[in-house]
Structure formats: structure tokens, C-alpha cells
Image: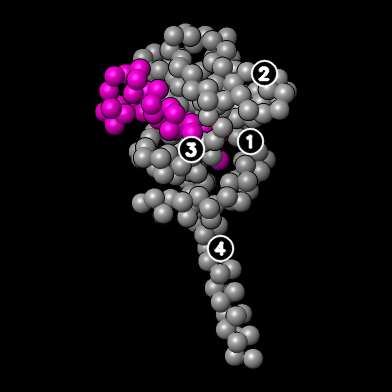
């Protein structure tokens, strides 16, 4: 009985150690990837959606993404934006993609430079549906194009893994900078899903 208990404790300790190591590695990658800010010309840029307050008001996090996207698109006149996100939250009246587009237009970005990916409800779907839109619009294979995505800085690492899981490795990354307080909160949320994301990543390799 004692040997069995000792073995169980040893196994439990190994599992806990594995979780701690995984979380620490994930956190280090979140911090490292948060610094990414691709500044060269892209053919297409996915602008990942985010929380909508009420009917059609972007959350603070989403507004920072929109502002960063506008800044990039003003500097890179040939880049086409693909705004991402459906209409699936209670009380929401427009898709995230449409709301992002409307704000970009107000900020001076031409509407014909913005494609809508307005059916998705997850980051997985952002990339899967967005890939099809880019290929249809360009008439080229996705892999012939220089494409990137823009999201909150704390989300870049996980979103990059999700892109790879969906067959889109090597996407350029542009981070919308968060305050230290928001980064800590965002990183904490990212850590909650770290084991599942990493498991999915290695399962699909």
C-alpha cells in the first residue's frame, strides 16, 4: 500500500512538474513573440477580431488592434486587409469584421482595400476562412503570397500556433501593444489554454 501511494505521489509530482514547465515555456514565448512588429510590405493582412461591447462597440483591446491596423495600412498602400470575425455574441448587431472595416474606413483606409471574413467564431476559423478569401481574391495559392496577421501583443504566440495547426506556417506577425496591466491579464488567459493548444499543435505535426 505504501509503495502504491509513493508511486502515485511520484506520478502526480511528474504531472505537476510537466504542467509547470509547459506553462513557463508558454509564458516565455508569449513575452518573446509580443515584441513582433513586422514593418515590411505584406500582400494581405488578417486583422483578428475581438470582443464587441453591446451592439457594435469595439472593446478597448479590439480598438487598439484597429488603430494599429490603420497605422500599418496607411504606411503600406498595397496591402489588402482581411478583417475577421462573425456576429455571434448576444446583443451584437454586426459582425466583428464589418465593425472593424467601418472603423478603418473612418480612419482613412479605402473600403476596397478591406475584405470581410465575417463567418468565423474562433481564431481557427479566422485563418481557415481567411485563407479561402485570400486565394479567391488574389487568384493565387496562399503560399505564393506574403501574408501576416495582426492581433494583441499577448495573443501573437498562440495565434501563430493556431495558424500552423491550420496549415498556415510562417505568417508575419504585427502586435497591437497593450498596457502592462492588460498584457498581464491577457497573458494569464493565454496560459489557461496553453496545454490544449500545445497538444493540438503537436498532434497535427
Instruction: Name the N-terminal-most of marks 2 and 4.
Output: 4
User: What residue does disc 4 label?
Assistant: 19
Instruction: Name the N-terminal-most of marks 3 and 4.
Output: 4
**Residue 148 shown in magenta:** yes
What is the span of residues highlighted in magenta in the rendered image? Answer: 125-154
Question: Marks 1 and 2, how far apart in space?
Answer: 29 Å
Answer above or below: position of 17 versus 84. below
Q: Nearer the viewer, mark 2 or mark 4?
A: 2
Expressed as whole percent of the image width and height from the top left, the position of residue 188 reads 63, 48
Answer above or below: position of 8 versus 66. below
Q: Nearer the viewer, residue 42 or 199?
A: 199
Point 63% across, 18% down: residue? 94
User: What residue does disc 2 label?
Assistant: 93
User: What residue does disc 1 label?
Assistant: 179
Q: Is residue 187 left or right of residue 150?
A: right
Q: By what rule are the colours in the image chosen? A: one colour
Label placed on residue 124? 3
Amino acid at each position: 500500500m505504501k509503495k502504491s501511494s509513493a508511486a502515485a505521489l511520484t506520478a502526480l509530482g511528474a504531472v505537476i512538474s510537466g504542467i509547470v514547465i509547459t506553462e513557463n515555456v508558454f509564458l516565455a514565448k508569449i513575452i518573446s513573440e509580443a515584441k513582433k512588429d513586422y514593418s515590411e510590405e505584406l500582400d494581405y493582412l488578417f486583422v483578428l477580431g475581438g470582443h464587441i461591447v453591446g451592439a457594435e462597440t469595439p472593446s478597448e483591446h479590439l480598438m487598439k488592434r484597429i488603430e494599429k491596423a490603420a497605422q500599418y495600412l496607411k504606411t503600406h498602400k498595397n496591402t489588402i486587409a482581411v478583417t475577421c470575425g462573425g456576429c455571434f455574441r448576444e446583443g451584437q448587431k454586426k459582425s466583428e469584421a464589418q465593425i472593424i472595416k467601418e472603423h478603418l474606413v473612418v480612419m482613412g483606409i479605402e473600403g476596397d482595400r478591406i475584405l470581410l471574413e465575417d463567418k468565423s467564431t474562433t481564431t481557427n476559423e479566422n485563418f481557415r476562412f481567411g485563407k479561402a478569401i485570400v486565394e479567391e481574391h488574389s487568384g493565387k495559392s496562399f503560399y505564393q503570397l506574403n501574408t501576416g496577421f495582426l492581433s494583441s501583443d499577448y495573443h501573437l504566440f498562440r495565434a501563430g500556433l493556431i495558424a500552423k495547426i491550420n496549415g498556415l506556417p510562417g505568417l508575419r506577425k504585427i502586435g497591437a501593444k497593450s498596457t502592462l496591466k492588460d498584457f498581464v491579464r491577457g497573458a494569464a488567459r493565454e496560459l489557461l489554454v496553453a496545454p490544449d493548444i500545445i497538444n493540438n499543435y503537436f498532434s497535427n505535426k
